[in-house]
Image (cartoon, rainbow, N blue to C red):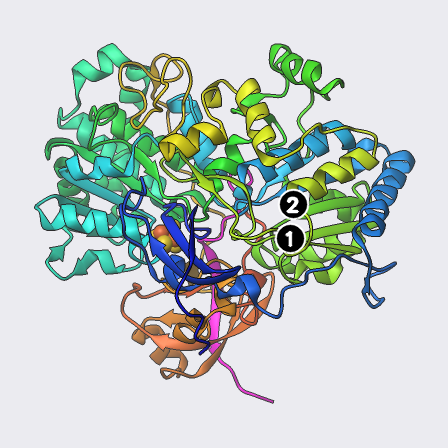
């Protein structure tokens, strides 16, 4: 332990882990970070923090960090450290060569939900302006893209409806496919406070998460559904609301459309809890009781996570929850709403910033001429009106040989995307893979150019949290790499003949504000003055918008959508009789690139496979033994933990360690609307591993 002495300066900034977006005072001695102190005036956290934000910052100066650019001719060669000019010149030369030989659609970029809004905006501008196409996608593709689609279809905007503080006014919390205690701890504390004060809790999750039963909290209902049956469950709940006359008819008549068609659809007996009981795996009377409680228990709020989105019907489920909220009039005031809990710090922002292949910033379709005009005039270029490739389409095109150059900012796609073997085949096929990251991650094994990235302690910009709150991220020190990430992207674009036109990060936000109506009132200056603000922030809402859809929906009327349940193709078979599902643990974060390089790693040194004692006994597996998990796409090895948190027939693991590589077994199945992978349902076999 190094005694750094007392801090002598403070920088106010934002946690770079989960989507709660806690505000911290970084206390430093010189350039050395001594401690992170949660900020009592932080809009999202009000002085609270968790073990990640408070303690897991040591990765920022971990010796594994790569601080210099590197290049190599082929992925079999050794890396050569080079200066920035050489590296960026090499990137521009290689991308330009591919563009000239195969056409502009052969290159693209992937943005990260960990980088700032300004950095994401820079990448999408480089792809659209310098590459000349819309082949830009965000890693939110593999987590919350169904949220974007589903909430846009029903409410008219791709974002959660509430401020976190709204939960203080909730009477019933419906938590679906989320484990806030582990994944969003500071907001979970707020939920627990409300539950201890008497609010009722309904949890819908195949796993008995901590929230189901914790000190002074007992869920009124734990609907322990079979993985992959979310839509059947939400339809059954809506069926009860409609057929038992529990609808908020006044709200439906005045605020919604599509009501008649939806009511006719959902009232059909095929959606009744009794008919769906076997499919869902939950007793019909429990589903009925939960639906009645949600509809009649006062202010009902829905909170959900990746257990909703990462399914073949992720988008349908998001619409199903929006239907349930509208049916019961639980939209447009404190204590209600439909609220995605975002896993990463800037999932909301990376989606807002136009890094989808079909949308410019502010969720405006690339095919809309009046929107393209705004950017064409400002950027002095002509934009391709056709949507580009999504991440899985990029992989498929790379394997086919029609997509040859890829820029990846802050995302370890070789580890985090499903069906690892297919991803590796795609990355191997590229002529030029450029990775911008803190560490030589798994994806960098396939790269030709490595560009060192900056940690959150060096960044200057903004993150947008799960409640649409735009928080400032301020640098505690100059970039240890010598360049900001937006600068690197800007210089590549410049070398390819497209001038991005910025001197600093504040200029980028000014451009975002000038071109994106929901951000019109946002600037670094304003944020420095007020602390943080929730978008939309513009002339109509100069102080921001804590609660959305108060008097009318963003699309005018809320639209009820018919949501037919379609079973996933991923079913248990004789060969793969168990269903694997995945989640997070408190001390770790995503693929662990950061937290594994901090003291937090000792709290969860490996991913474990939770298996029910009955399933373990059938296979002769004891607690702590290594097992082989195999699916139709691959196999991996994990240590077994016997647990009755999962029902018989369902196994569970986390995905924080590369050795176990849960994504070796997850399949190419994905959401029908957005291609978000179906991480949460994989048919597997588990067997005791016999070492050779
Ligand atoms: Fe960071 Fe999330 Fe923990 Fe807050 S709750 S300190 S944002 S990881």
Identify the image quadrant of residue 270.
Answer: top left
Closer to the camera in the image, 391 or 377: 377
Q: From the image, which quarter does the C terminus lie in?
A: bottom right
The answer to whether the residue labelled 2 contacts the one labelled 1, judged by CB atoms less than 8 Å apart, is yes
Residue 71 left/right relative to 500: right
Give the residue number, with chain letter if any, for mark 1.
453
Mark seen at residue 592: none
Q: Residue furthest front?
A: 8
Residue drawn at (65%, 45%) of the image? 485
Residue 605: in magenta span: no
Give the residue number, with chain letter if any, for mark 2.
485
For residue 401, above or below residue 518 = below
Return the x and y of residue 174 as percentages of the image width and height: 23, 42
| SS at circle 1 | loop
Which residues make up the magenta segment?
A: 671-692
Q: Sort mark 2 into few (<14), some (14-19) or many (20+) by Cα contacts within 10 Å.
A: many
Residue 647 left/right relative to 73: left
Residue 679: in magenta span: yes
Return the x and y of residue 156 as percentages of the image width and height: 41, 21
Q: Residue furthest left?
A: 198
Closer to the camera in the image, 519 or 183: 519
Residue drawn at (13%, 28%) of the image? 244
| SS at circle 2 | helix
Residue drawn at (32%, 43%) of the image? 42
Residue 26 left/right relative to 100: left
Residue drawn at (63%, 14%) of the image? 374
Residue 577 left/right relative to 207: right
Return the x and y of residue 593 as percentages of the image width and height: 55, 62
């Amino acid at each position: 332990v190094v005694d750094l002495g007392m801090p002598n300066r403070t920088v106010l900034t934002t946690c770079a882990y989960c989507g709660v977006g806690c505000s911290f005072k970084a206390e430093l001695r010189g350039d050395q970070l001594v401690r992170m102190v949660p900020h009592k005036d932080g809009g999202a956290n009000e002085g609270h923090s968790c073990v990640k934000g408070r303690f897991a910052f040591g990765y920022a100066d971990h010796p594994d960090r790569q601080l210099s650019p590197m290049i190599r001719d082929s992925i079999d060669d050794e890396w050569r450290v080079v200066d920035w000019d050489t590296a960026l010149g090499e990137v521009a030369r290689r991308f330009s060569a591919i563009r000239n030989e195969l056409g502009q659609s052969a290159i693209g970029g992937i943005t990260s939900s960990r980088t700032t809004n300004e950095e994401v905006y820079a990448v999408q501008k480089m792809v659209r302006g310098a590459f000349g196409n819309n082949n830009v996608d965000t890693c939110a593709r593999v987590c919350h893209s169904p949220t974007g689609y589903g909430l846009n279809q029903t409410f008219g905007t791709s974002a959660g409806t509430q401020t976190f503080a709204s939960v203080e006014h909730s009477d019933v919390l419906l938590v679906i496919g989320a484990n806030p205690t582990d994944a969003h701890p500071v907001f979970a504390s707020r939920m627990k406070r409300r539950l201890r004060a008497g609010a009722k809790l309904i949890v819908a999750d195949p796993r008995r998460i901590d929230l189901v039963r914790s000190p002074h909290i007992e869920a009124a209902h734990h609907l322990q559904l079979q993985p992959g049956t979310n839509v059947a469950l939400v339809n059954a709940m809506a069926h009860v609301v409609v057929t038992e006359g529990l609808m908020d008819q006044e709200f439906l008549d005045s605020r919604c459309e599509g009501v008649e068609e939806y009511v006719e659809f959902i009232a059909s007996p095929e959606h009744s809890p009794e008919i769906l009981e076997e499919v869902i795996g939950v007793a019909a009377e429990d589903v009925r009781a939960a639906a009645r409680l949600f509809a009649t228990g006062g202010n009902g709020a829905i909170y959900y996570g990746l257990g909703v989105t990462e399914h073949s019907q992720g988008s349908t489920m998001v619409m199903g929850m929006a239907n349930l909220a509208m049916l019961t009039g639980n939209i447009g005031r404190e204590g209600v709403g439909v609220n995605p809990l975002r896993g990463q710090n800037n999932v909301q922002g990376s989606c807002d910033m136009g890094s989808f292949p079909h949308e410019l910033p502010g969720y405006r379709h690339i095919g809309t001429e009046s929107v393209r005009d705004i950017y064409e005039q400002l950027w002095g270029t002509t934009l391709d009106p056709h949507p580009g490739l999504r991440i899985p389409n990029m992989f498929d095109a790379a394997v086919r040989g029609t997509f040859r150059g890829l820029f990846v900012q802050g995302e370890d796609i070789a580890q985090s995307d499903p069906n690892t073997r297919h991803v590796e085949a795609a990355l191997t096929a590229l002529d030029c893979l450029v990775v911008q990251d803190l560490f030589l991650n798994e994806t960098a094994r396939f790269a030709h150019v490595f560009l060192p990235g900056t940690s959150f302690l060096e960044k200057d910009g903004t993150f947008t949290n799960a409640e649409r709150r735009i928080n400032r991220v301020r640098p505690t020190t100059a970039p240890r790499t010598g360049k900001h990430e937006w600068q690197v992207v800007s210089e590549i674009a410049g070398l390819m003949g497209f001038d991005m036109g910025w001197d600093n990060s504040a200029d980028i936000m000014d451009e975002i504000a000038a071109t994106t109506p929901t951000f019109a009132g946002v600037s670094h200056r304003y944020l420095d003055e007020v602390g943080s603000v929730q978008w939309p922030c513009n002339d109509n809402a100069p102080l921001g918008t804590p609660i959305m859809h108060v008097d009318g929906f963003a699309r005018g009327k809320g639209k009820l959508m018919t949501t037919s349940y379609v079973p996933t193709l991923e079913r248990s078979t004789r060969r793969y009789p168990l269903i694997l599902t995945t989640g997070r643990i408190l001390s770790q974060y995503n693929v662990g690139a950061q937290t594994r390089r901090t003291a937090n790693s000792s709290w969860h040194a490996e991913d474990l496979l939770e298996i029910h004692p009955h399933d373990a006994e059938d296979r002769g597996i004891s607690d702590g033994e290594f097992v082989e998990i195999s699916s139709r796409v691959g196999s991996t090895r994990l240590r077994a933990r016997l647990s009755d948190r999962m029902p018989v027939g369902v196994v569970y693991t986390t995905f924080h360690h590369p050795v176990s590589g849960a994504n070796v077994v997850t399949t190419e199945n994905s959401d029908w609307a957005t291609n978000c992978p179906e991480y949460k349902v994989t048919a597997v076999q588990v067997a005791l591993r016999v070492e050779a």
